[in-house]
Amino acid sequence: MATNELIAWLGIKSTWQGIVAQVYVFAIFSFYILKSKNQE
């Protein structure tokens, strides 16, 4: 099951939709990190 999920993830990653999703998640993650650092 985990292997199938990994294959599916790799398949999604290779598509433009997967790339957009990764950039979107990375942007939110970076924003969250910067926001946390500013609070300290």
Image (cartoon, grey):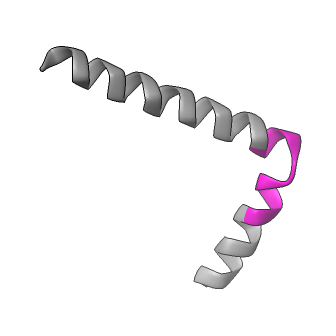
Q: Residue furthest right?
A: 15
Q: Position of residue 23 (x, y in %)?
A: 66, 33
Q: Where does the N terminus fall, quadrant-wise? A: bottom right
14 vs 36: above or below? below
Whether 8 is drawn above or below 14: the answer is: below
Q: Nearer the viewer, residue 12 or 38?
A: 38
Relative to 13, is 15 on the left or the right? right
Left or right of 14 on screen, residue 5: left
* Residue 14: percent from left, percent from top: 85, 54
Residue 19 is situated, as x and y percent measured from the top left of the image, at 77, 41
Q: Main secondary structure of the magenta part?
A: helix
Whether the magenta-drawn stretch holds residue 16 is answered as yes
Up-down relation of residue 4 to residue 16 (above or below): below
Q: Is residue 21 rendered to the left or right of residue 38?
A: right
Q: Work out which quarter of the rendered image holds the C terminus and state it.
A: top left
Instruction: State how many labels appear.
Output: 0
In the displayed orientation, state which residue is furthest to the top. Answer: 38
Q: Residue at 23% of width from left, 15% of height from top? A: 38
Asked if 16 appears above or below 7 in the picture, the reply is: above
The residue at the point 56 percent across, 36 percent down is 25
Please state the extent of the stretch shown in magenta in the rendering: 10-18
User: Which residue: 79% across, 55% down?
Assistant: 12
Residue 11 in which image quadrant? bottom right
Q: Quadrant of residue 5?
A: bottom right
Residue 12 included in the magenta stretch of the image:
yes
